[in-house]
Image: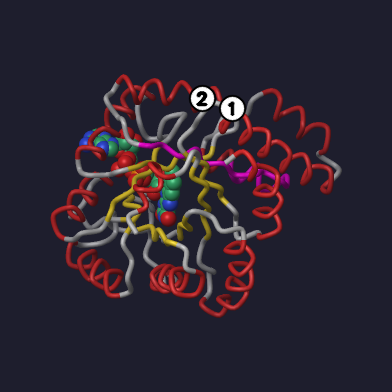
Amino acid sequence: MNISTLFQQKKTVFSVEIFPPKRTDGIDTLYKSLDRIAAIKPDYISVTYSAGGSATNELTGRIAADIKTRYGIEPLPHLTCLYNTREQVRAQLDSLAQNGIENILALRGDRRPDMEVCHDFSYASDLAAFIRDNSSFNCVGACYPEGHPEAPGRARDVRNLKYKIDAGVTHLNSQLFLDNDDFYSFLELCEAADINVPIEAGIMPLMSKSQIERMIVGFGASMPRKFSRIISRYENDPDGLFKAGIGYAISQIIDLISQGVSGIHLYTMNRPDVAEMIYDSVKSML
Ligand code: FAD
């Protein structure tokens, strides 16, 4: 199924992201988690891909194929292009197509100082155009409500985002954000830039001190005062911080659904307990 059709069928699409294990021998643990994540019946499940090239990249396609056959849920494997040649991309597209995959999240991927880029693709829009011209996959893209960290500003980043849409991307999944107003103003910028595809809000529940530090530093998400207060209050209480983090994500989602967003894309971090708690709290609104 082309997942872009979901947006015509559903009031609010609810999708989730998982990542392959770092080592191939972690696959059994992932499938135990997936059994429970799939049981909440998300509209589709996206599977990340390591930009720097890794042994587990082959797993992205394998897990995506299993999501479709084992659980009957549409998979969305990610694919990055900075460190892939055209031929490597072509081979991966062929393999995904043979496994019945119909949708791909086309990404540039992060730069790695320790690796030489391949120069066949510079931006995600190049990959999206290649996919459009060489296959029949439906192509999804990433977007950044607070602006991509490398872009010289949000307005410029949104202008660059338009290249992806022009290259055939049919919907966008957003980076995590903690202040819904950032997402709403981003939607306005997109509309003004003639970006009219559905945009799913990326929600990552932040539940531990180390995860918060990693995510805020890694993704450059700004921290609203409401969220800083939660951290101060629960910094020495891991259980309290976990519950407050889940509660914060739920309150974000409830507000987003009430405001009529096209979809919620939940970063599960492979935690079925987290996916279940959040889904149970919001499912009646979807
Ligand atoms: P692009 O859209 O190519 O943008 C990168 C930068 O280039 C931006 O600053 C943009 O403004 C600029 N730009 C774009 N086009 C042009 C142009 N024509 N001229 C000048 N500047 C331009 N990373 C992974 O490694 N694996 C994953 O599985 C993965 N999944 C992700 C899923 C989501 C939903 C999101 C939001 C991010 C994900 N990432 C993943 C991270 C992503 O790869 C990085 O954020 C990366 O730095 C940018 O990728 P992109 O596809 O958004 O790049």
- Considering every residue shown, the one lying at the far left of the view is 133
Q: Classify 55 as above or below 284.
A: below
Residue depicted at x 67% and y 39%? 250
Q: Is residue 257 magenta?
A: no
Q: Amino acid at mark 1?
A: Asp
Q: Residues within 10 Å of mark 1 (few under 14, many from 20)?
A: some
Residue depicted at x 46% and y 73%? 66
Q: Position of residue 133 (x, y in %)?
A: 13, 54
Q: Residues within 10 Å of mark 2 (few under 14, many from 20)?
A: some
Tell me if residue 132 can be seen.
Answer: yes
Label 1 residue near ligand 1, CB within 8 Å? no
Q: Is residue 35 left or right of residue 163?
A: right
What range is drawn magenta here? 198-215
Q: Classify 284 as above or below 106.
A: above
Q: Is residue 108 left or right of residue 67?
A: left
Q: Please state, as top left, top right, bottom left or bottom right, where the N terminus lies in the image.
A: bottom left
Tell me if residue 110 can be seen.
Answer: no
Q: Position of residue 240 (x, y in %)?
A: 84, 43
> Picture quarter containing residue 95?
bottom left
Residue that mark 1 sits on: 179
Q: What secondary structure is marked by label 1?
A: loop
> Picture quarter containing residue 125?
top left
Q: What secondary structure is marked by label 2?
A: helix
Label 2 residue near ligand 1, CB within 8 Å? no
Q: Position of residue 216 (x, y in %)?
A: 59, 38
Q: Is residue 203 magenta?
A: yes
Q: Classify 38 as above or below 226.
A: below
Residue that mark 2 sits on: 182
Comparing 236 with 131, the one in front is 131
